[in-house]
Image (spheres, rainbow, N blue to C red):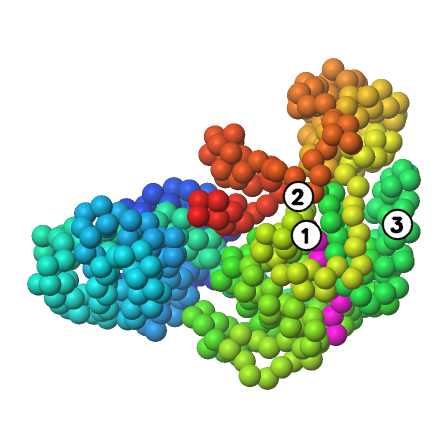
Amino acid sequence: MNAPRSPLEAGDKPVIWTVSVSRLSELFRDITVEYDHLASIEPLHLGFDEAAKHIRERLAVEHCDVVIAAGSNAAWLKGRVSVPVVAAKASGFDVLKALARARRVSHRIGVISYQAPLPELADFAATFGLDLAQRTYVTREDARAAVHELKAEGIAVIVGAGLITDLSEEAGLTGVFLYSAASIRQAFDDALELARLTRLEAGRGRRKGAEQRARRGMNDLRGDSPAMERLRQTVVLYARSPSTVLIEGETGSGKELVAQAIHRESPRRGANRPFVAVNCGAIAESLLESELFGHEEGAFTGARRGGHAGLFEAANGGTLFLDEIGEMPLALQTRLLRVLEEREVMRVGGTRPVPIDVRVISATHCDLEARVREGRFRADLFYRLAVLRLALPPLRARAQDIAPLAEWSLKQALAALDARPHPNLAAEVKACAPLLSSYAWPGNVRELRNLMERVALFLAAEPLQALTPAFMLSVAPELGRQAAPAIDALPRPGAARESVAAVLARFGGQRDLAAQHLGISRTTLWRRLKAEGS
């Protein structure tokens, strides 16, 4: 029998198996289409012991990163297979929508949940005058008995997971399915993130002793405009202080680059003083806590044997950069505030605090003060993170830097292609300066750099082609479609912005493009969509 393949031998995509035996299979199938470019996903139409046995047999010769299941199936598998199991969970919004659908059928509603009743439903029923009867189950036989008990009480509609709705309909009742597509998408996002962390841990085991460090410094803060000169002076000044720094700026404006420069100029720049970065919006909410604070062995399904040091411990003695801090869930904001105040961290599932010496630099592209007013960000945490504040100028506000940055980026991109720049490249870029300066650059320096990579590809393929405004437009037609607005006409922080749903509709439902336009991850995109829907 062959040994199981390692994650790296299994290919670049994570391997995910979905387990279901009910109508949840249809929802899994529909959502899989959205994620099949990110992972190798296989449905297993099995349940309970049959599913556990099948998974154990296959794991002997195959690799799987994560299993996704729901309800009783997920709980059953967690203690019976060695692979991590992500449980799809119905949100409170799912429950409310299911109850609304059930209310159209009958004023008396049955709710059957796995293991424990939903305590908040009693208050909800009393507030809105609903006649609710709750039951719980562990086994399939329990579920069947609960359905028949509710039927005997005259209840005609039952809310629950796939097993419950199937059994309800077998009994001649109306079954209302609890899970929504958004909840299943969240499970897939969690599974992808758990797979990433699992592979990262495997990589850490092979790269013991490797330090995370800041690769960029002051020389990478390019530009001769007064705004950039002030920025460099501020970086040097802030580097002398041990206080927290909040960097504010649009997507692509170089927030992490500035954070690295502050670290490199500070007393924490030594060889054993790491710079550790994490994007709070790119990690699923259910995994961010473990990633930041670490976990002890057995803290949750899939927890690393022997426990795992979180990023705060990894950054001890150095700097921790929390990018997109505005996307951090409120529950974790409380823990972060305590760590900043107490200078110690408690791992998930742990009882012993670990002292830390970490300087925290955070960054955001949103208006955190507006989020504080809206109750979406803790005021005390905001003031604790923003002892020192630094606002990065957008590229359109420093027009004199655009052409030099374009020339530098183009030379770097040509060198990466082993192509030699034209002798008169500087003059050609200067001739294109009016075209480049008239564009709004919503993606800022990152967008400029990416565009120059595209231009370099065409120039390398046609070495005799001159870099003219007409050629630039043919390669990058977006430059002619959007003029840069006057600085005074730009939206102020906190001004009304386009909803995520509107952006998604504008991009024809393509989530990757919408997330890229907004400067957020797919996980954050769906989190905001869910919030708008509520």
Helix, strand or loop for the magenta stretch, by majority: strand
Residue at (31%, 56%) from the top-left corner? 128
In the rendered view of the protein, which quadrant contains the N terminus?
bottom left
Q: Secondary structure at mark 3?
A: helix
Vertical placement of residue 355 versus 421, above or below: below
- Name the amino acid, label 2: Gly
Q: Secondary structure at mark 1?
A: helix
Residue 165 is left or right of residue 19, and the answer is left
Q: What residue sits right under mark 3 in the picture?
A: 232
Q: Residue 215 versus residue 114: which sits nearer the camera?
A: 114
Q: What residue sits right under mark 2 in the picture?
A: 494
Q: Position of residue 176 (x, y in %)?
A: 23, 51
Whether 100 is among the magenta residues is: no
Residue at (67%, 52%) from the top-left corner? 368
**Label drawn at residue 369:** 1
Residue at (65%, 39%) from the top-left corner? 495
Vertical placement of residue 453 versus 120, above or below: above
Residue 327 picture quarter = bottom right
**In the image, which residues are magenta?**
357-364
Q: Is residue 85 visible?
A: yes
Q: Secondary structure at mark 2?
A: loop
Residue 464 picture quarter = top right
Q: Name the N-terminal-most of marks 3 and 2.
A: 3
- Name the amino acid, label 1: Glu
